[in-house]
Amino acid sequence: MDQLLYGIPVIGLVFQLVGYLIAIVPPIAPIILRSATPLALGAMCGVMCERSGIVNIGIEGTMLASAFTGWVVGIAVAPLFPHAAAFLFGITPALLIALAAALLVAVLISALHAWLSISLRADQIISGTIINIAAFGVTGYLNTIIAKTSPTSAGSFTAWRPPADLTNLPFVGWILRMFLNQGPLTMLVLVLVIVFQVLLFRSRWGLRTRAVGEHPKAAETVGIDVTRLRYRNVLVAGLFAGLAGAFLSMEATNSFQAGMTNGIGFIALAAMILGRWTPIGALLAALLFASFKAIGQTINFLPPAGQLGSIVSAVPAQLFDALPYIVTIIVLAGVVGRSTPPAADGQPYERESAT
Amino acid sequence: MIGDRRVLLDVRMRKLGSVVLLPVIAIVLALIVGSIVILFSELLIPGHTFDPLLPFVAYEALLEGALGSDNAIVGTLVFTAPLVLGGLAVAVGFKAGLFNIGARGQFLVGALGAVAAGVAVAGQPSIIAIPIAVLAGMAAGGLWGFIVGALKALSGAHEVVTTIMLNYVADSLLAALVSGPLKVPNSPSPVTFDVGNAAYPVLIGRNGHLGLLIAIVAIVVIWWLLYRTTRGFEIRTVGANPDAARYAGMRPRVIVPLTMTLSGMLAGLAGTGEILGINHHMTSGFSTTVGFDSIAVALLARSNPFGVLPAALLFGAMRSGAGLMQIKAGIPAELVDVVQATILLVLVATPVIRRLLRLRGTPAAIEAAPTITKSYSGETVVR
């Protein structure tokens, strides 16, 4: 009897919530995918590093540095191409050069991390912390100086406009719009995630990478060069962080603000953990986190009606910002499933000397 | 006998050399890197005539801002006090093989606890109000640390990840409380009431508050705790070798949460000082650089409680002088972060420095290394 009494209002609330979500999710779906993009890219950087046994908490700093580089190089090269007309996605030569520069910087920073953690066997977490502090300092410093000259940015990649016939289709129109009404980097993420997932679990490279992350000694005995593979993977992982940074200053916005990553690199780390160190899992986790944020913001200006509305309005809006982190802690604590990192994650590998 | 003594002296000198020499090399190299950054940035300003001496102008202004007058010196001390407490917090963690990246979150939650309690007892006499607010701040910070330690002990969740997550939860909690229950009703902006009588009294200079004294006392207490008590011995043993500690009958499962709680209390005390000593109230924009600076302090001090003082003074002076540097030389304050990151980089890359300078017998500057990331991969160190 008690159960019934408690049950009925809860069921009613659940229905209200589902109804509310069905009403608001389609219109905000493109926004969700867009804000999941840097998270998913950052998380893939993490997956690639940690699958090879290198902990990288410097993703945040790497992103920030590439966001800044993309913006600055864009400013510098834009005057060289005064008449370049943008065709698809707003792509101009200046933007492409800026993107290349952003990726280059990310790879350089990853090279530093790789050198410190693989060759010097320094503590990988300290190395990541250094990258974060240095990136925050250098970009903040240079930004203060450059912003004084009030420069004109090279613009940004723009979203593709799918034909209205497609997006107005009943039931599936909003899904098409979610995936098609996007900029090039966002669309690229979906491709990258699938390719990366297949490579990691179905290719020779993937098997070797996972072996190096789980049991480097065993990998070495079957002839895999652990050091080289780790170096290569950490450098390639830098490209993902670079894309994430470029997305922030060249697709999501066309400008740079000091500290603009604002924790995205760390939520990416959380997405990686929640996604259990797989690319697709990380993307789903990133989408989940992005929906928390988007729904939280929507509730602010479009609160649900009725009983649900009065409950939701009592919840402070800031709670939605904290949800990704709280969910990650709960998952880490083993309350909802278990998330176990690769066995040799974070451990420097020392080759046994041949005698 | 005499030979023995000479060997002992030699070993001591060498140890002193490595403890002092490497940080000094790191600081000098960092200042050089800082000047390169300054010179490079000059090239970016259009219409600016290149001044090769600008780094010296900047560092002079930095020094003047930090130590140029009595007020500046007290200002530096005020910047130093939270770094001492934060540095101790991180150092205590290192001693137990724990990397507390969450000093920032514990600092904020500690400040939140202090302001909540401080406002509640604002009308009481100071002798009662201050201890209550301080205890509340320490308890809040300690709780934030305890969550991390308990999770590690119970499920092996690595403290680096949980502390990072809790840093952001602390941000949200602070924003929610300051614009919610703690907000002054009908105030246009999210701000709390004043802590009134719970505020730290000013002891020296313009704003040299009680927190300076607390920081000094904390150094001695932590040293005593780590090196003169059984618990401290257990903490250090668990950090050095958890298996040996377990074999000797110590329980890492108890020591780890205990250490994290202690660490959180110290960081919370730093946040408490910021509220009771300086701000006296809290806005929703309350934030801090103490969290990451503390990691730098602890690393530079090699987790030695007494070493924390000079390390904190160095970074405190830089933070304190950065304002004048910005005004006089037009150099953005973020230069401090660049210098700080370079110092850490040099300390981490010690093997390279040793090879370059042909230093021998100097142990790695960051000794905590083997114990920190070891436990990351779910290898349950705590059992």
Image: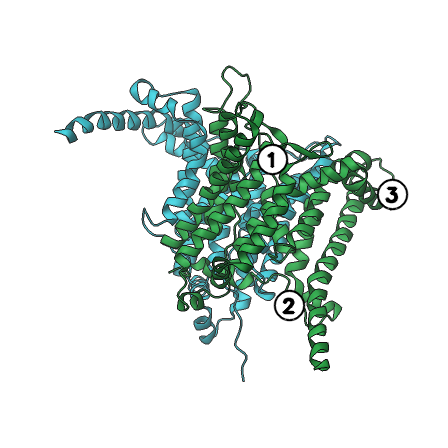
Chain colours: A cyan, B green
Q: Are marks 3 and 2 on the same chain?
A: yes
Residue at image position (58%, 41%) is B270
Disc nearer the start of the sequence (1/2)? 1
Q: Residues within 10 Å of mark 1 (few under 14, many from 20)?
A: many
Q: Earlier in the sequence, mark 3 or mark 1?
A: 3
For disc 2, the neighbor class at 10 Å (few under 14, some 14 to 19, many from 20) is some
Q: CA distance from mark 3 to mark 1?
A: 38 Å
Q: Position of residue B72 (x, y in %)?
A: 76, 37
Residue in the picture at 47% in, 33% down: B173
The amino acid sitting under disc 1 is Glu
Which residue bears the numbered disc 1? B274
Chain name for mark 3: B
Q: Secondary structure at mark 1?
A: helix
Residue B51 disc label: 3
Q: Chain of mark 1?
A: B
Q: Any mark on residue B363, and which?
A: 2
Q: Are marks 1 and 2 on the same chain?
A: yes
Of A322 and B260, which appears nearest the observer?
B260
Which residue corresponds to the image point at 84% horizontal and 37% vertical from the top-left?
Answer: B48
